[in-house]
Image (cartoon, rainbow, N blue to C red):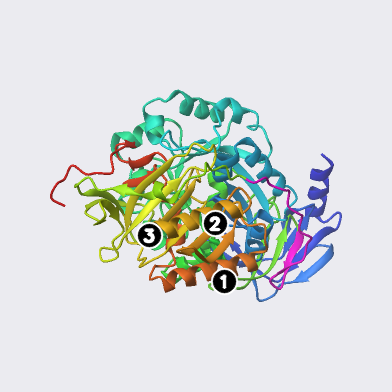
Amino acid sequence: MEDVSKRINAAYGKIPCDLLLKGGTIINVFTGALEQVTIAVKDGRIVGYGDRKAKTVVDVSGKHLCPGLIDVHLHLESTLLAPSEITRLLLPRGTTTIVADPHEIANVSGFDGIQWMLEATEKQPLNYFFWLPSCVPATHLETSGAILTSDDLATLINHPRIVGMGEMMNVPGVVNGDRESLAKIHLADDHGKIIDGHAPQVSGSMLDAYLAAGISADHECTSLSEAREKLAKGMRILIREGSAARNLQDLLPLINDNNWQRISFVLDDRHVDDLCESGGLDNMIRTAIHYGIDPVRAISLASFTSAQRMGWRNRGHLGIGAIADIVVLEDIEAFRVSDVWKTGVQVVANGNITCDMPGMPAFSNTMNVLPFTLERFQIPDKGQPVKVIGLQSGQIITKSLVMRPRVRHELLVPDPVQDIAKIAVVERHKATGNIGLGFVRGMGLRKAAVACSIAHDSHNIIVAGMDDVSMFTAVQTIIDAGGGIAVCDGEIVESLLPLPIAGLMSDQPFEQVLAKLKELKEALGKLGANPDILMTISFLALPVIPELKLTDKGIVDVNQFFHVPLESEDKHA
């Protein structure tokens, strides 16, 4: 009770506060108002408004103060960065708390991957909390590096930085009463933890059944009608602005005076280049303001409502008793950050981190691929049209197309005229020798190949290309690097970004990762491809996002949730 007594006495003015931020205008998320208030801090908590004796007084006149930003659904692995580099990027932009779902690294390395994440974020000046990954593997339709059961997850459920059960992607499993899916839901319920959702295009009675399981939020809405149905049925809506899935502009009209407290901004999957060049939650705030959302409300959607979603009463606002995560803004509409206090300690001054950054634990090589020859990429022509994955701009949802690629020497081959590339998924965890083969339309490649060891959610090696030699070279380059992203033309490696941490993240500073990523995109641009396909290709193996996907076990019709032949029954395509 000593700390509480000190805070009470500091609030009354009986003892000095630790910090006084004087003369600024606070963003009051409770009233929606801008108020000129002096903030007093003691032992990392806000203890009062107005002048008091204080050990340190900082004049913030002419500036705005807002609560630290909170992202309640982010995959750290998708940034391509180690956690310390994510801190370096996001803390100076005002993000002070992240709730991450480590199901990417868990699908590669299982329990060890989660433990690595906890260790790597332990002493960061940015708060990292974690969801327990509920779908390792995401489905039975692919080969993952690990399997985590409810019994496995139970060993971590009481960890102080584990907040709940991560996104339940196996919607059919939930609504059909899959035993293990329900066991994970019960595990969270029994320990008073919340459950995160993942229900793209789910509606009607199936949505009702999904919600009846106690799942409380969704970040997969891509249309207003979808978001409105989910919101009306009690879900919290997490509006996402990732690198491949950009839903903010389409969903902003959802927000009104009656429902805004049930809506939050999240990043989900966002690459380092977007974080560096545009930002994270700060960018979402700027965009929302640009399209007419009130600045106080826009900031609340990236702080207060996120804290409410997590059940955190002492985060996401600058009220009395709140943890003193305080962001100082030079310009509210541009959301330009000058300083950040984390639990009452200054960690950013004039846009620069002022605290020490911890080191990073080691990680073992995760490449275990059965040797193969490039002939494994050949697809015999059976005289029929084939199913082709159709890309959609700005979305990770795909279309199921029926097309006829070119035929050469009785083999189906890529067709640059129709913008059809060959695609393969090579299993990399258990040396099974599995290689799934198919075609994709919309990549824009004229020649060469691009491969990466990021292939949601099992993260086998995925490669798309216009010839087998380039595809083979790209895959071998990834294996030799211990993971990464490669662009290869024939036997020549045009560009490589190594990702030695689980084949998902770099161990280098973000500046170097950004430079390599730009080099990769330039190489793709020279080949005629849209550089954004680097994020898009990583989702083409995710068999929980409609309509058509490819895993190491073959083509998946996501709507039917089972494997289908590459050849189509439609003879007239």
Q: Which residue is mark 3?
A: 467
> Regarding mark 1 in the picture, which secondary structure is present there?
loop
- Which of 442 and 55 lies nearest the eye of the viewer? 442
Residue 159 placed where, x, y %?
A: 68, 35
Quarter holding the N terminus is top right
Cα–Cα span, label 3 and label 1: 51 Å
Residue 118 placed where, x, y %?
A: 68, 43
Write down the region rendered in magenta.
345-365
- Residue 186, relative to residue 555: is it above or below? above
> Regarding mark 2 in the picture, which secondary structure is present there?
helix
Q: Which mark is residue 72?
A: none
Residue 61 placed where, x, y %?
A: 69, 75
Q: Earlier in the sequence, mark 2 or mark 3?
A: 3
How many residues crowd around disc 2 within 10 Å: few (fewer than 14), some, or many (20 or more)? many
- Which of 423 and 298 lies nearest the eye of the viewer? 423
Whether residue 145 sits left or right of residue 115 in the image: it is: left
Q: Which residue is mark 2?
A: 477
Task: Please name the residue shown 39% across and 60% down the image.
Answer: 252
Please state which of the two labelled residues, at mark 3 or mark 1, is closer to the viewer: 3
